[in-house]
Amino acid sequence: MSSAQLAFNDVEYAWPGMTSPLFTGLTVQFPAGWTGIVGANGAGKSTLQQIAVGHLVPQQGAVHRVGSALCVAQRTDNLPENFEDFIWAPDALAIKSRLRIGDDWADADRWRTLSHGERKRAQIGVALWLEPEILALDEPTNHIDADARRLLVQVLKGFAGIGLLVSHDRDLLDELCTHCLMLDPPGAVLRSGGVTDALAQQETDERAAQNENEALRRTASRMRAEAQRRRVMADQKAAAVRSSKQKKIPAHDHDGRAMRNLAKLTGRDAWAGKLAGQMTRRAGKIEEQRSGLRLHKHYETGIWVDGASCLPRDFLLRLPAGELPLGAPRADAGAGREGNEEGGAGRGVLRFPDLALGGTDRIALTGANGLGKSTLVRHILSHLDIPEERLVSIPQEITAEESRVLLENVKRLPNDERGRVMTTISRLGSRPARLLESELPSPGEVRKLLLALGIVRGPHLIVMDEPTNHMDLSGILCLEEALAGCPCAMLLVSHDRPFLEKIAHRYWHIEPDPGIDEPKNSRLTIADIPVQTDIQGLS
C-alpha cells in the first residue's frame, strides 16, 4: 500500500488580474485511490491539480504532500519530459505495448506528426512508467478511441497511490473514483462515490438547503410583520394616552376611560414596543442563519444558435468517390501545424464513396484513431460550396498561444458583440467575468469561445472535431440541447456515442480495409445507425 499523503489546509489562490480568489479557505484531505475533480470550465480544476503536485504555490494556506507527484496536463503540444528515457527503458516495454507506443515517437520531428490521441497515450505512458505516488490526470480520455480507452482504464485501476482525475467522461469518473471533489469557487465539497453518486448527493443537499432557506425566510418575514404590527399597536396606545391627558374624557365615554386606565395600570404600550424590538432581533438572527447556508447559485443555461439557417434544397458538398493518402499534413497538430492524424507518410489510403452533405444533414464521422477522420475533414472543408462566414469549424485543439490571442481578440470586440459572446459563454455554464480576467483560457473555455463566436454569425454548417473534449459536464448537456435544436447542417467527429445519438441522423464510419500491398488502408461506409465497435460510451 502506498504511503502517499495529500491535504490542503486553508488554501487560497488567485491568478494575476483576478478581482477575487479562485479558492478561499480550501481544506480537504485526499484519500487513497482516485478522486474526481468536478466543476465548470474555469472553476479551477487544472489549477487545483497544479497546486496539488507543487507546480503552483498558494498565496495563503499550506499543502501537505508526502510522496512524489506528477501531473499530466490536457495540452499535447510538447514532448513529455523523460520521454526518450521511457522509450528506451527495458522496464517500459509492457506499458509501451499496452498503450501501443512506438519506439520512433521520441524524435521531435516525429512527435509533430503524431495525432493528439497518440500524444495523449504517450503522455500517460511516461507518467505511469515514472510511478509517482500522487498522480494528477487532466482529461486523459481526450482524443483516444474505444480500444485505447479500455486499456487505459485497466492500467489506471491498478494505480495504488493518490490520484486526482479531471474528466468530462462520466463513465470514467464512475469506474475509477471513490470520491469526487465538487468545485464551486471559492470553495469545494468532497463527496463519496463516483460522479453520478456525487451529483445526486449534491442535488439532495442543495434542495435541502433551499428548503431550509425558504423556511427561515418565511419565519423571518412573519416575525418582521408581527414586530411591525406590535410597533403600530404601541404607537397607537401611546398616542391614545397622550390624547387622553390633553382632553377631559366625558363621564359617559366608558371605552376611553377604560383604555386610559388600562394604559396607566399595565404600561402595555411600552410592553408592545419591547416585544417588537425582541422580534426584530430574532428576525435578524434568522437572517444570519440564512447567510450561513451553502446555497449553490444557479445560472441560466441553454443556448439557441441564433440566426442559423438551413438550405434544404441545396447541397453544401458533393464529392465523387475517390481516395486520400493517409499521412497528409494536419491542420491542428500544434506548433508548426505539420503533424498528421495517421502518424506519418506511407500509411496507405482512405477510400470513400460518393459523398453529399445537404443543408439539413447531421453527419457523425466515426472510427478508430489513425484511420483518416481528420484527413477527410480537411478534404471536405476545402471543397465546401458555402460562404466562409457561414461556416463554423472548431478543430480538436489549438495551441496555448493561439488561445491567448483568441481571448485578447474577444476582449477587443465592440461592447454589444462581446456581450452576445459572453451571454453564450454564461449559458454554456462558465462565468464570463472569470474568463475575461484570465490571460489564458482553459481548453474547455476555448471551445466555448470558438462556438460562441461562430454562432453569432448565423451558420449554415457547423463542423466540430471531438466536440465534447475539454468541455465540462454541464457544457456538454447545453451543447447537446443547442445542436439538437439547430436547423443548420452539421458534421461531428466524435467517439462519444451518447452525444452523437442525440444529434446525428446519418453516420459516416471509417474502418480498416487492409490489402496485401497496403496493410494500412481504410474505407468509409455510410449508414443511418451508429456502428458500435469503435464509438465509446461516454456520457
Image (cartoon, rainbow, N blue to C red):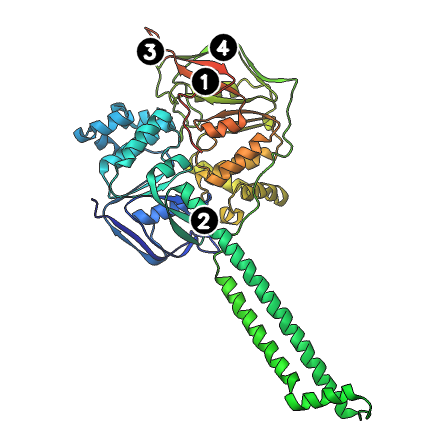
> In the image shown, does 153 or 354 lie closer to the viewer?
153
Q: Which mark is residue 331?
A: none
- Dot 2 or dot 4: first in sequence order is 2
- Dot 1 or dot 4: first in sequence order is 4
Judging from the image, what secondary structure is the residue with disc 4 in? loop
Judging from the image, what secondary structure is the residue with disc 3 in? loop
Q: Position of residue 33 (x, y in %)?
A: 29, 43
- Dot 3 or dot 4: first in sequence order is 4
Q: Is residue 70 above or below residue 155?
A: below
Between the C-alphas of marks 1 and 3, the distance is: 19 Å
Q: Residue furthest top?
A: 516
Q: Residue furthest left?
A: 90
Q: Position of residue 256 (x, y in %)?
A: 77, 87
Image quadrant of residue 396? top left
Between the C-alphas of marks 1 and 4, the distance is: 12 Å
Residue occupied by mark 3: 519
Between the C-alphas of marks 2 and 1, the distance is: 39 Å
Q: Is residue 93 left or right of residue 187?
A: left
Q: Nearer the viewer, mark 2 or mark 1?
A: 2
Residue occupied by mark 2: 202
Q: Is residue 149 above or below residue 286?
A: above
Between the C-alphas of marks 3 and 4, the distance is: 20 Å
The answer to whether residue 104 is seen in the rendering is: yes
Q: Is residue 59 above or below residue 434?
A: below
Location of the C terminus (image quadrant): top left
Q: Position of residue 412 (x, y in %)?
A: 56, 43
- Dot 2 or dot 1: first in sequence order is 2
Residue occupied by mark 1: 509
